[in-house]
Image (spheres, rainbow, N blue to C red):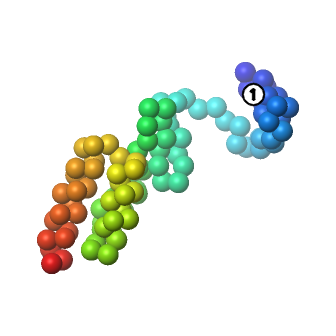
Amino acid sequence: MRERIIHFIKEKLHLYLHPKNDIIMQEKDGLRFLGVVIFPQGRRLNKRNWQRARSKLNLHNNASYSGFVRKHSSVKRIREFNWTLLEKLKSEL
């Protein structure tokens, strides 16, 4: 199967696939890309980026982190983030 895929990419798409990067992974493991784990059903933030968004949240960057979390998280995580945001804003005011 790998040989057929490499041949297709080379002949039809005219692309070169580096031998180091031609690994085949199961979809349940997800694909890590730019701080997000991508699955066929959706995506989620890496644990590190989730913790970073919560810890670095303040009055000046709340819109940025809020959009970041909303774009890549579940409804439960978004609600948790909103409560964290509310607590931070109350403490800063």
- Asked whether the viewer can see residue 2, the reply is yes
Judged from this view, the residue extending furthest toward the top is 1
Q: Position of residue 28 (x, y in %)?
A: 47, 30
On-image quarter of the C terminus: bottom left
Give left or right: position of 42 versus 8: left
User: Residue, x 17% and y 63% (percent of image)?
Assistant: 86
- Asked whether the viewer can see residue 53, the reply is no
69 or 34, nearer to the observer: 69
As shown in the figure, which amino acid type bears the numbered disc 1? Ile
- Answer above or below: position of 34 versus 64: above
Q: How many marks?
A: 1
On-image quarter of the N terminus: top right
Q: Secondary structure at mark 1?
A: helix
Judged from this view, the residue extending furthest toward the bottom is 93
User: Residue, x 34% and y 51% (percent of image)?
Assistant: 70
User: Residue, x 47% and y 49% (percent of image)?
Assistant: 36
User: Residue, x 44% and y 32% (percent of image)?
Assistant: 41
